[in-house]
Image: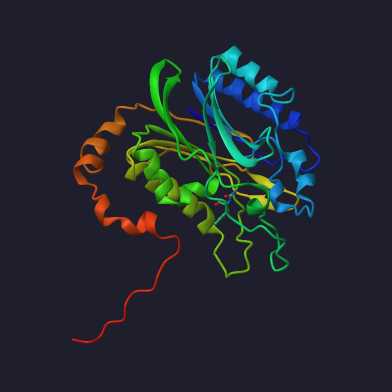
Amino acid sequence: VAAAQLGPIQLAEGREVAVARMVRLMERAHARGVQLVVFPELALTTFFPRHHHEDRAEADRWFETAMPSNATAPLFAAARKFGITFHLGYAERTPDGHHYNTAILVSPEGDILLKYRKVHLPGHAEFDPKRAVQHLEKRYFEVGNLGFPVINAPAGDLSGVNMGMLICNDRRWPEAWRMLGLQSVELALCGYNTPSLNQSAAGFEAPHLRVFHSHLSVQAGAYQNATFAVACAKAGTEDGCELFGHSIIVNPQGEITAMATSWDDELITADCNLDMCTLGRTTIFAFDKHRRPEAYDRITGQVGATLPPRWEGK
Ligand code: ING
């Protein structure tokens, strides 16, 4: 597998610029014998949720109404030419006018094997004057309505791999990983666009923690659900706003087996022997043997945290 990390896509750069760069990365992937390529979240355009459009309809320019389209056809053609299965993140506008932050898994023949719409939308819905940079995902996207699906489908020379997807902020929520784990996921695919500086005016966060938290989340999610994971960044400075790279591929033991060291277009690859999922799945994380859902009522019964009762003394 490969993570095909993308560097910045500027506001003025059309989809064809990003697609041409993605085709070049796919060519490099083919040269290295890669069978599955993961591209980032919202891989076709600049990270537009940093821009406020008073009229939401103005933001429709960032969305795809067809997949593939003329702009994305070269990517589908390259995948067919090289026999590569690929993951693509993009802004989806449905025929009936719904807007989602979407990821698809596409076969070399161009079939859409799996579609996922981002559930955990970070940021805010209205312009926030306190913020140095807006993060308006709650303004432009609806919460995903497809759950957290996993599919068993061909990938490369394997006839069936259990594949599932997360998008960006989802990776920080253990519930999202566990939904995939409870469907025996073997390869979790995640694209992200993550600012390298905390822009919410909620307090200082040392910059080095941004990459640390991203890696921590993916490594924990992979380990605790005995799955491989590919986390692929859109990186670099767009409109003066820096997104971090450091894409990674992680094995079911939680080890990073490949990491990007640039914040630009960069291909990282790793071999994935799916048998490596078996140990965790049949011992520590044998869910059927060890999970106690009857004790987890708060996890689906509550949204926010409640306060604990006060100790009344002995
Ligand atoms: N971006 C960021 C992410 O979750 C974020 C937003 C960054 C939230 C850091 C909290 C902390 O990686 C997206 N697009 O979700």
Task: Residue at 59%, 50% (x, y): give it.
Answer: 194
* Image location (x, y in percent) of residue 274: 34, 27
Please say which color scheme the image uses: rainbow
* Residue 227 falls in image quadrant: top left
Farthest residue to the top: give it. 81
Query: Is residue 40 at least partly visible in the picture?
Result: no
Quadrant occupied by the C terminus = bottom left
As drawn, 112 above or below 249: above
As drawn, 287 above or below 267: below
Query: Is residue 314 at least partly visible in the picture?
Result: yes
Q: Is residue 248 left or right of residue 60?
A: left
Q: Nearer the viewer, residue 29 or 173?
A: 173
Q: Nearer the viewer, residue 101 or 260?
A: 101
How many marks do you count on the picture? 0
Farthest residue to the front: give it. 96
Farthest residue to the bottom: give it. 313
Task: Residue at 69%, 58% (x, y): give it.
Answer: 134
* Residue 20 falls in image quadrant: top right
* Image location (x, y in percent) of residue 222: 38, 42
Task: Residue at 69%, 25% (x, y): give it.
Answer: 72
Q: Nearer the viewer, residue 46 or 68?
A: 68
* Image location (x, y in percent) of residue 238: 72, 47
* Image location (x, y in percent) of residue 38: 54, 31
